[in-house]
Image (cartoon, helix red, strand yellow):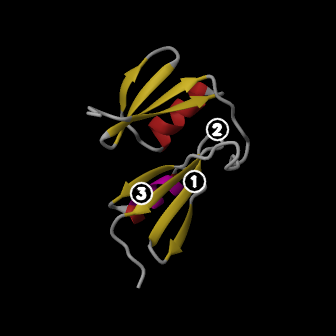
Amino acid sequence: MNIAESGIILFTEHYEAAVTFYGDSLGLPVRERQADLTVFAFGASYLMVERGGFASPTEKSRQANPLVLRLDIADFESEVTRLKQKNLAVTVDTFAWGRIACLIDTEGNRIELKDTKEKPA
């Protein structure tokens, strides 16, 4: 298999709110926008947000959504601060292998930001 590029498709119930979250709150650049889908740059990949999913007012269980969007972040502290300044609920957890910040999108999907620099002692 010779893969030129890879992506993730996220189906949403509240499409415009999800597009605003990923574009304005997370700050992902828009690569393409159509009536029913938006493609965001997502590292060396893309994240396509489309209509047709279901939302949850709280974090979806692993049974409802066994996928986590994880982004490796070099400037972890400033990114966590920036997200909190946008009034997003962000929690930071430290493990033997490193740190992650967790937040939930407008649809109840879990997002993790992994600190690429900090390793616990």
Question: Which residue is the site of mark 1?
Answer: 103
Q: Which of marks 1 and 3 is nearer the N terminus?
A: 3
Q: Which of marks 2 and 3 is nearer the N terminus?
A: 3
Q: How many angstroms separate mark 2 from mark 3 (CA)?
A: 21 Å
- Label annotation for residue 107: 2
Mark closer to the observer (2, 3): 2
Q: Does the magenta stretch include residue 105?
A: no
Q: Residue at x 38, y 56 (%)?
A: 72
Instruction: From this view, report whether residue 29 is shown above or below residue 99.
Output: above
User: Residue 107, position in %: x, y?
Assistant: 64, 38
Span highlighted in magenta in the image:
78-84
User: Residue 87, position in %: x, y?
Assistant: 58, 51
User: Where, quadrant-wise, is the N terminus in this rendering?
Assistant: top left
Q: Is residue 82 magenta?
A: yes
Question: Which residue is the site of mark 3?
Answer: 79
User: Residue 9, position in %: x, y?
Assistant: 49, 31
Q: What element carries label 2?
A: loop
Q: Which residue sits furthest top? A: 35
Instruction: From this view, report whether residue 95 is shown above or below residue 20.
Output: below
Q: What element carries label 1?
A: strand
